[in-house]
Image: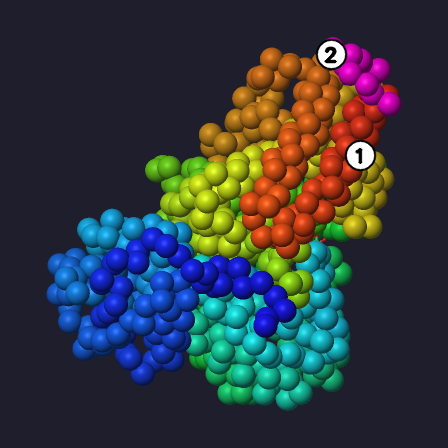
Amino acid sequence: MKTYADLWIGYKERKANRDCTQLGKFYLSGADKADKIVKNAVEELKTGLKAMLDVEPKIVFGEAAAPEEITNGKAILDSEEYRISLREDCVAIESKSGAGILYGVFDVLRTVACEKEIGKTYAAGKRVRPANPLRMLDHWDNMDGSIERGYSGESFFYVNNEIVINERTRDYARMIAAVGINGVVINNVNVKQAASYMITDRYFDKLTELGEIFAGYGIRLFLSLNYASTIEIGGLDSADPLDENVIAWWKDKMAEVFRRIPTLGGFLVKADSEGRPGPFTYGRTQVDGANMLADIVKEYNGIIIWRCFVYNCRQDWRDKKTDRARAGYDNFMPMDGDYHDNVILQIKNGPMDFQIREPISPLLGGLKKTNQMLEVQIAQEYTGHQIDVCYLIPEFKEILGFKTYCKESDDTVADIISGNTFENRYCGIAAVTNTGNDFNWTGNYLAGANLYGFGRLAFGTGLSSKEIAEEFVRMTISQDKEVVDQIVNILLPSREIYERYTSPLGIGWMVQPATHYGCSVDGYEYDRWGTYHRADHLGIGVDRTDKGTGYALQYNEPNASMYNDPEKCPDELVLFFHHLPYTHKLHSGKTVIQHIYDTHFEGYEEARQLAKEWYQLKGKIDDVIFENVSERFERQLINAREWCDQVNSYFFRKSGIPDEKGRQIW
Ligand code: GCW
């Protein structure tokens, strides 16, 4: 008996599709049948169909790609792309790669698990090409087993500075491959001392084994790199990217690392950020640092993913000219085009740090000659710690759909990171993951929808938030239509509800600094992190217009003019861009202060409503899931109530303006 939930690879018995004869035989073609990914795919298919339908399918391998069959008269399938069609006596899955076959198998298993009709789903043939080349999960796991910003137990990769490989490791690979993830960074971007040794003999054997397991599911292993490894483990006194001794050390080191871990995809680097070392220390640029490493790993097909989270974290709160929001663009735009081909800049979705609402980073669509990757966070650092329900896929859809105007056409963030706009080969999307060794992987069972959903969305940007939520519920909780609808109706509005009872109109923060959970309106106000709301008795918000910090002008037109003008700026971001009087009228017709009161009272009520809907599921779903989420809801309501009352009282006391509706403010 496993000690943990198997979520969407659990394959419970299903009723639908039992009379589908084609499921008795599979024709797999295009890929090499000796490929270990194909072997894993076949095993998965057999396990899944046996458990769900009691079917033991016969597997027939086609010859290596018969071109007409695979291309269907059109361009040859991209690697990772697959096609599923129904023949008289079988289901055919075709792909040029083992990974494509695996994704095709998971597509069929998902269809069966969701009780959708095989006949209808595949009758016309289904051809799927992943939307993004790189679809990654970034773990912030430390080698002592702790997880930075982890809300679901400890690491399942590390215990006591050792790498652990067990059944859970393989199940993890299966689970994330099932949603289309093809890259994993297994250690924290803050590479502490112990983790610097990951690129030494001490860990190579384990990393090789781990890399092989992942590779069997089409997933490439990546490591976070300590930029100052030359000093930390190399015995040199410098990490200057132009220093010959530094370069020579890295050359030897990378030769060793890629020889010992042949499946390694490359490295993720957090440099010159929040106390991490980097090229700035030596008067060099981010380009110098990134290119130095990239040039060395190139011969091993390695890539360097370089984070853009570079800002001054020692700001004086009295200083109104320095603006943390500007930092990414200011640091990285001037050298657009200078990064080498195997460098990707990884850009957080917003200019600050994963708040519940932020504008899109102006680097996305600002950069035109540099590989770009979007970084989002499914670890709920600022969005409720996997205590509060907060289904993030609607937010990610908004981010992906944002029009950047980087060209005359309507290119969105999704177009850029998929490589469609600028024809990049290396690009994609990464999420800081929300997993840990809790029995259900994500703490709150419903937070599993973010893990599931991130992968599905990264693979198929066109899927809707609702489709994804439905799949998650059907695959892991219930097939009962009423139950499915009820849980989907809890998930879908949960992000906006969370926003309503927390920080309004794009302000963000207002959290307790020690944990980032719970309300503290002034928690960051007089601190060094550049995260201020600037509220006084007359108004609130940060002036980021041409008269303020100028951040709004970092966008392409017409976005710059829209954000620069309080009359055009969308309500939900208006205090991010403008300092406004409490009496300012929003597009909604409400004043800023009334909006704050209304959304907080309503947000709390809506959270209570969500909890009520959940409690009605007692007896209709698995008790363990019911209890797990119920207990979280109890804590969510306490949290929501605190936020509501503290925010409303704070702004009433500052402004002296009463609530029009006369509700109780403390
Ligand atoms: O805001 C910060 C988080 C840190 C994190 C950092 C980052 C891993 O609070 O915990 O460090 O973002 O993204 O690098």
The residue drawn where x is 59% and y is 49% is 446
So how many labels did they put on this image? 2
Instruction: Say if residue 644 shows up in the picture.
Output: yes
The percent coordinates of residue 430 (x first, y second) are 53, 57
Residue type at tag 2:
Lys
SS for callout 1: helix
Disc 2 designates what residue? 661
Q: Could you say which disc has been placed on residue 154 in the image?
A: none
> Main SS of the magenta segment?
loop
Q: Please state the horizontal and vertical placement of residue 619, each as a whole percent of the image.
A: 59, 46
Locate residue 179 relative to residue 437 in the image: left or right. Answer: left
Question: What amino acid type should be assigned to the residue bearing mark 1?
Answer: Glu
Residue located beneath label 1 in the image: 642
Q: Eyeballing the image, is 400 above or below 83?
A: above
Q: Is residue 223 magenta?
A: no
* SS for dot 2: loop
Q: Position of residue 263 (x, y in %)?
A: 48, 79
Q: Is residue 166 left or right of residue 507?
A: left
Q: Quadrant of the C terminus?
A: top right
Tell me where the magenta segment starts and ends, as one range. Answer: 654-666
User: How far apart are labels 2 and 1 at the CA level?
Assistant: 20 Å
Q: Is residue 665 magenta?
A: yes
